[in-house]
Image (cartoon, helix red, strand yellow):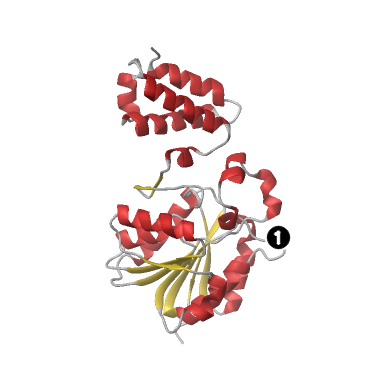
């Protein structure tokens, strides 16, 4: 009978052409946490214990999937985001650290304000609207996505995390036909922003498995979502309301200028933890 440590070595040997050693270790720890409920410390105490046949089979299946470049979050159907576990599948993006930074900025700048009306555009797994609803004081949160599958997944996450969210399955490009006189304190979006020219530098597990609809934008119009959502925000943000975007790091100044020309004030371009242009925060004029 193989022991847990045998599988750790197997993962290291079989995945070394795809990931560095630290990444393989992190992946293996996610797997054993999911299968055996072991954290890093308890694994060290139990790594010489035998692995039953059914668990050994599952570990081999996971390894086969990983060798096909399938992300571990899709294999386990879950991802951590801002301290919560979200269900994920191939209809939604895997939540990223950069998006955690966007959410954290909103929470820190808005947490003193009660009863905020918020709309998130492009919900995906629901990570942005759900975390905002959980951390902001009595916030009323709406979220929109064109994908029925994404809405279904986001609804499951909202139910699992006991967070009431209002969902709209619609295309943001048709916002003028969908919305009437609704007014929001915050408009937030992490829209598709990767251009086809950037594919060459991307990981195979992203290109092969994550939804293109949520990732990529036409090379000829890389800021089209920011244009459309800014127009929506001009009409549906309250005076002094806040607009937040996650953006393409290579188009920071262009995105900032677009938002400024739309008529927003106090347009800030904010870098992420890695020093890349990542967030736009702007205010709607008070008059």
- In this rendering, the answer to whether 151 lies above or below 12 is below
> Of helix, strand and loop, which one carries label 1?
loop
Q: Is residue 126 visible?
A: no
In percent of width and height, residue 211 lies at 56, 52
Q: Residue at x 30, y 63 (%)?
A: 164
- In this rendering, the answer to whether 216 lies above or below 85 is below
Q: Quadrant of residue 215?
A: bottom right
Q: Quadrant of the N terminus?
A: top left
Q: Residue at x 47, y 48 (%)?
A: 97
In percent of width and height, residue 256 lies at 59, 68
Q: Is residue 160 visible?
A: yes
Q: Which residue is mark 1?
A: 219
Q: Residue at x 58, y 40 (%)?
A: 205
- In this rendering, the answer to whether 126 lies above or below 118 is above
Q: Residue at the far bottom: name it.
A: 287
Q: Looking at this view, is 112 or 211 the one in front?
A: 211
For disc 1, the neighbor class at 10 Å (few under 14, some 14 to 19, many from 20) is few
Total numbered labels placed on residues in the image:
1
Instruction: Judge from the rendering whether residue 236 lies leftward or rightward of residue 50; answer left or right.
Output: right
In percent of width and height, residue 165 lies at 34, 65
Instruction: Judge from the rendering whether residue 195 lies leftward or rightward of residue 76; answer left or right.
Output: right
Q: Looking at this view, is 286 or 8 the one in front?
A: 8
Q: Looking at this view, is 159 or 228 the one in front?
A: 159
In percent of width and height, residue 251 lies at 64, 60
- In this rendering, the answer to whether 79 lies above or below 112 is above
């Amino acid at each position: 009978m193989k022991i847990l440590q045998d599988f750790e070595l197997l993962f290291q040997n079989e995945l070394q052409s795809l990931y560095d050693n630290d990444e393989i270790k992190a992946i293996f720890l996610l797997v054993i946490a999911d299968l055996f409920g072991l954290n890093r410390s308890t694994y060290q105490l139990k790594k010489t214990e035998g692995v039953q046949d059914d668990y050994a089979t599952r570990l081999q299946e996971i390894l086969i999937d990983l060798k096909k470049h399938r992300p571990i979050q899709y294999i386990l159907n879950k991802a951590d985001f801002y301290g919560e576990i979200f269900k994920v599948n191939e209809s939604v993006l895997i939540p990223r650290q950069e998006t955690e930074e966007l959410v954290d900025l909103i929470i820190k700048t808005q947490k003193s304000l009660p009863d905020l009306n918020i709309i998130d555009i492009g919900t995906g797994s629901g990570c942005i609207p759900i975390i905002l609803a959980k951390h902001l004081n009595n916030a009323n949160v709406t979220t929109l996505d064109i994908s029925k599958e994404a809405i279904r997944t986001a609804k499951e996450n909202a139910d699992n995390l006991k967070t009431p969210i209002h969902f709209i399955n619609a295309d943001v490009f048709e916002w003028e036909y969908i919305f009437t006189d609704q007014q929001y304190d915050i408009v937030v979006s992490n829209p598709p922003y990767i251009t086809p020219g950037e594919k060459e530098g991307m990981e195979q597990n992203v290109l092969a498995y994550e939804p293109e609809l949520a990732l990529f934008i036409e090379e000829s119009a890389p800021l089209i979502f920011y244009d459309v959502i800014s127009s929506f925000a001009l009409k549906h943000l309250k005076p002094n309301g806040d607009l937040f975007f996650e953006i393409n790091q290579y188009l920071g100044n262009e995105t900032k200028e677009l938002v400024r020309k739309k008529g927003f004030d106090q347009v800030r371009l904010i870098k992420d933890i890695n020093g890349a242009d990542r967030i736009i925060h702007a205010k709607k004029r008070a008059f």
